[in-house]
Every structure is written in C-alpha cells, then in structure tokens.
Amino acid sequence: MIKGKNRRFIRAILLVMLPWLASSANQKRPYQECISYFENTPNQLNVYRLYGRFDGNTVFILGGIQGDEPGGFLSADLYPNLVLDRGNLIVIPRANFHSIIKNSRGVNGDMNRRFDNKPPNDIDDQIVDIIQSLMAESDLFINLHDGWGFYREKYIDKNHNPKRFGQSVIADADVYITGDDTLYLEQMARTVLARVNRRIDNPDHYMHFMNTRTLDEDTKFPEMKKSATYFALTHFGIPAFGIESSKNLASLDEKIRYHNYAINEFLKLFGVEPEHPAIIYESPKLIYLLISINDNTPMVVDNNNTVKLIRGDQIRITHIESNYTRGISCDVLGVGNDQDFQKRLVINSPTRIIVRKDNLIFGEVVLDVSDVDNHLFSYIIEVNGQKQALLNGQTLHVKRSDQIKILNVLHDQLLPDRYKVNLKGYVPPGEYNDGEDRNYPIAVESLRWKKYSLNGEGKIYPVIVVNNNKELSRIYISIE
C-alpha cells in the first residue's frame, strides 16, 4: 500500500524517539517482542510486536480501549503468540487495563474520545499518545469493540436497527482520499464481510458494514471525530476499521470467534500470513502466589489459603502462578490500589488478596492479622555449651568469662524467620550488621557498649525480638 509523505516523515522521527524500534532491525526474522509501559500499575500497557519471516504490511490490532468489552480484548489476546510467515503485527490487547479491571467503560472517561490533539493531561492521554505513535508505523488499524444489539441499515426492531453497533465492521467513510492514494474502505469491509458471513451459521449473527460518515457535516456520529479510527484515517492516511461483536450474544466464545473471523480476513486482505490462533477460551485458574513477608524469602501460598501476619508486617507479592500470563492483576483490598503486584505494602488489619484475569476474580488469599502474645516466646541460649531456656521478661545470669550463643527464639504461632533476635551491645563479625545475632559464639567480655545496657551501667544487656522495627519480646543478660 502506498504511504503518504507525512507518514514517512513521522516514521523517521519515531526511529529516533524510540530506540527499541531501531534495535529491532538487527533481529533475525521471524521474531516477537513485548514492550511494557507503566509496569506493575493498574494502567500497565503491553505492546506486542510480531515480525514475519518476510517483511510486508503492518497491521495494528487494538483491544480493550473500553474496559467493559471482553469480546474485543480477549480476541486481541489470542494474537501475541503467533508466528508470522509474512508481514508484521502490532497488538495491544488491553489498552485500558485499569478500566478492564474495574469492568468500566472508562475509569477516567471514554479513552476512545481522547484522540483530539489536545495536550496530554493524564495517564489515559499518555496511553493515547503511544497508540498514535504506533499508528504511524501501520498500514491498517483495527479497533475491537463489543456493542449493543445488531446493526442493520434499516429499522427492524429495538435490537436490530441503524443505531445499534453490534455485529458490524465500521468505517468513518466509504472512500477516503489521501495526498497520494484513495482508500476504498467500504469495498475492503464488504470483501471481508462476505468471507466472514460464510463461516457464521446463524443469519441473525451476520456482520454488516456500517458507515458513520464521520467526515460529513451532517453526520449522526460527530463524536467519532475524537475516536482512534478517525485519527488513524485522517492523520496517517491508513485504512481504519472498528469491529464490533454484539453484547447480546449468548456466549463469550461467540464474541471472540466473530472478532477473530473478521481480523483473520483483514490480515489476508493485507497480505499478513500468520498461523491463526485457536479460538479457545479456558477459564482462568490461580495455582499459587509467591509472597515475601518483611523481605524474607518468598513463600508459596496456594489459592484459597490463609497467611498469618503480625500487625505491621510488610508483604510483597512477587509471582502469580496461573494458567494465563496476560491480563493478570492482584489487589490487596483496602491497601495499595487496583494493581498491587510487586508492591511493598504494610498490613495492619485482616484483609484479602484477590487475583483477577481482566475483571474476573478467579482466586484469593486471606491475610489473617493479629497482635503477638509475647508470653509465648521461648529463648534457647547456650552458656559454655549448656542449653538453657528462658521466657519473655526473664534474666540470664552469666559471668564475664562465659561464652554464650543464642541458638533460637521460638513462638507457638510464628516461624523463626519472621523476626530478628538482637543482643544490644554486641556487634557480630563482618562488615554488615543486620541486627540478627542468632548462632554467633559471643564472649561475654566483649559486651562493652555501655550505652546499650540497662541504665548505661554495662551490667545488664537486653536481647530483643524485632519484627519490622517493632519490638515483640525481650529478655536480659546480667553480667555478674
């Protein structure tokens, strides 16, 4: 397809602005790459780029710009793992991930009305800027939606009429003339639709061409002038279409299937030859979470299990093991925000971690929070090779010539790695002192830091148990 001078100029600018585009030239085809923006936030944007064995046209597939249209974003999500024989793909399955999590058309308003050349104002505008930059590299733009009802050119009933969008391929004009090309949008769409409808068994589900006539002064859809397809068409001179499955369809599988029928025919039309994705949607399953408590080694927590915490513990979810890798988020309810993956969060009250695939909750872990009963701590200390046991608040009497070792401190409800044991006034060997003094041989005569002793007299030194900088228990070592 012939490209206009304006697009070539913008593409040259982008090669300077986006270094990862230039680095792609050294890769051996075919290959894939993923670039993530706003990572580990509710607005994470993953851009998947697929390069065929042979170069060719680039098709840009956009899903999830409106968060309550799962047929679109789940259809787009089937394409990032393709291997292409010819041509290239740019795929954004979830343009508006935060709205998908919330099952909302738009948490910050309708993102598909942000393509209006206004200066960036918020995170949605930043995402729109990225989408626009990718349009500049594309030969075809496809925006996936789910719409109510079934589009028909003439009124049939409340669900089948010209004001409904479902089961349609939408363009802003029938023909669009660029500086050096004429785009026959209706002809392209009808070619695709003829092939698509041959695969649909139910005539009521046939897809139809819808022309919003956005460029006409008397258009019934003036708001479309702020849409992604209109921007791609008028700013970059590329064919741009909206594909709408119907929200009235009985199953999600049908919505995904009809989207894929249309996408695959557009790919054929533009000479992009993939190994087509299977139209299979498996229910998401949470297998386990890896959770680090107070920066300790992460522990495996299975779905629907409980983690016992001390009030004030800090947790971090380091891994989510599921049968899906895309569209996954986790939310510690009442703490953090809608995407708490890899965040360090202090937990002060009982709550739950819920795990979502897009807007569907498919797993949870309970966080049980309690205060520690310090009477349940037992200290095991070795004095000159002999073990002794002490309880919270007790005193161990030693001589200055003795050698001691804090073997462990145990608690009925807590694992020993959940806290540190620190003998105040003792500095273990090595350059780094992390406040953990268990299992060091300690000569009592080395305790000479009087400022850490009781009343500064250098005779009684506390051994304290600390969790997240909070003291839980203590005993005393008295030097006779």
Image (tube, rainbow, N blue to C red):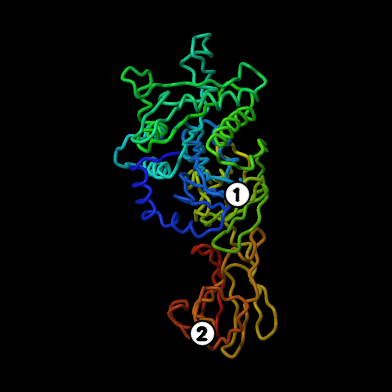
Is 69 in front, or is 14?
Answer: 14
| Tag of residue 368 | 1
Relative to 292, say whether 254 is above or below.
Answer: above
* Nearer to me, 296 or 350: 296
- Can residue 366 be seen from the camera position used here? no
The image quarter in which residue 404 lies: bottom right
Which tag is nearer the camera, tag 2 or tag 1? Answer: 1
Up-down relation of residue 345 to residue 111 (above or below): below
Q: Give how far apart the Cα atoms at labels 2 and 1 are.
A: 39 Å
Residue 311 point in image, percent of width and height: 53, 54
Amino acid type indicated by mark 1: Asp
State the image coordinates of residue 366 (x, y, percent, origin top left): 61, 46
Residue that sits furthest to the left in the current view: 119
Considering every residue shown, the one lying at the far right of the view is 386
Is residue 408 toward the left or the right of residue 24 in the image?
right
Q: Position of residue 473 (x, y in %)?
A: 56, 66
In primary-sequence order, the first of circles 2 and 1 is 1
Count of numbered circles in the view:
2
Q: Position of residue 176 (x, y in %)?
A: 38, 28
Task: Give me the residue at 45% from left, 82% from top.
Answer: 450
Query: Which quadrant does the N terminus fall into?
Result: top left
The numbered disc on residue 447 is: 2
Crowding at mark 1 (Cα within 10 Å: few <14, some 14-19, many 20+): some
Give the answer, above or below, for where 399 lies relative to 189.
below
Q: Which type of secondary structure does the marked residue at label 1 adopt?
A: strand
Amino acid residing under circle 2: Leu
Q: Residue furthest bottom?
A: 401
Dot 2 surroundings within 10 Å: few (below 14), some, or many (20 or more)?
Answer: many
Q: Is residue 460 above or below residue 198?
A: below
